[in-house]
Amino acid sequence: MANGSRQAAWEFFGTELKRRREDAGFTQVELGARVFVSGAYIGQFEQAIRKPQLDIAQRIDEVLQTDGIFERLCRKLIDDKRYADYFAKAAELEALATRICEFAPALVPGLLQTAAYARAVTLAMNPLAPDEFIEEKVSGRVERARILKDATRPVYWVILHENVLRVPVGGPAVMAAQLEHVAALARQRTVLVQVLPCTAGAYALMNGMLALMEFEDAPPTAYTEAVYSGNLLDDPAVVKRVQSSYDLLRAAALSPEASLALVESVAEDFRRCTSTT
């Protein structure tokens, strides 16, 4: 399903939710209390700003006695093959998070990727895939990043290993544009970026890619990823350990100011490469 048609479908979900809610005589706050989310979240569902999890859609059907319509809509919309099966649930939660802290040891995280960088990564991992497959994956990355443009965007803190900056994914021009994009987001204070320098040594070996997500009405969750696999962790003791690991990485990283300077310096180096070729 293309980006536009998916958004239109979520807008239909929201419009239908508002109509059914008002017909049942509930305010947003009253419905939210019955399905265990805030009234503000119900409003965001109705405006298609946020997308409800399946269990919330099921509770809405139960409260509004809508014969499963919202569950069916939700199942159809979240059955999204733009994301790997092991990441689909994490992507759903990512859109609901109020705070995301991420560590990227090898690649620029999906939320920060340009289309050209995402295309280069997808092609490298799927060299024989048809164009339709590649563009579907790229569109998924680009649409995910929309949450950073929302008025309700999460606080996003990312630690990039220095190798992420220096490996020329897609070539110098793609890398220059990608790093300039990261720097622009940092300068706009949309994201907070730190770089873990190579001189930090073993710190980068403590974890693979990891993300910590916090929510307004739910306990925090951690997501870790390895080769073609991912794990959502919601056990409080395990999430606490992941948070401790992230804190150590943060302490070993360069300051945000020094990190931004390094990102811009490496971007300039790649840009020089493009001008001499």
Image (cartoon, rainbow, N blue to C red):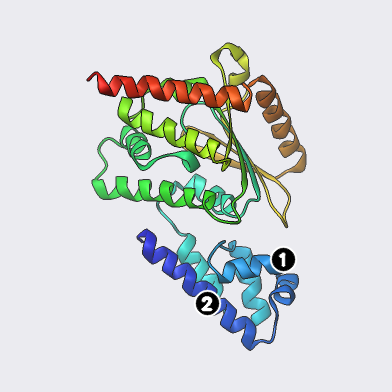
In this picture, is 105 found above or below 29?
A: above
Q: Is residue 179 visible?
A: yes
Badge 1 marks a residue whose secondary structure is loop
Indicate which disc residue 15 carries.
Answer: 2
Indicate which disc residue 38 carries.
Answer: 1
Q: Amino acid at mark 1?
A: Ser
In this picture, is 166 found above or below 41?
A: above
Viewer-side residue, 98 vs 182:
182
Indicate which disc residue 162 carries.
Answer: none
- Find residue 97 and report its horizontal and vertical position in percent: 63, 51
- Find residue 244 and report its horizontal and vertical position in percent: 73, 30
Residue at screen point 43% across, 30% down: 179
Q: Amino acid at mark 2?
A: Thr
- Find residue 245 and report its horizontal and vertical position in percent: 69, 27
Badge 2 marks a residue whose secondary structure is helix
Viewer-side residue, 275 vs 137:
275
Viewer-side residue, 153 vs 234:
153
Indicate the quadrant where residue 20 lies: bottom right
Q: Is residue 56 left or right of residue 88?
A: right
Q: Which corner quadrant holds the C terminus?
A: top left
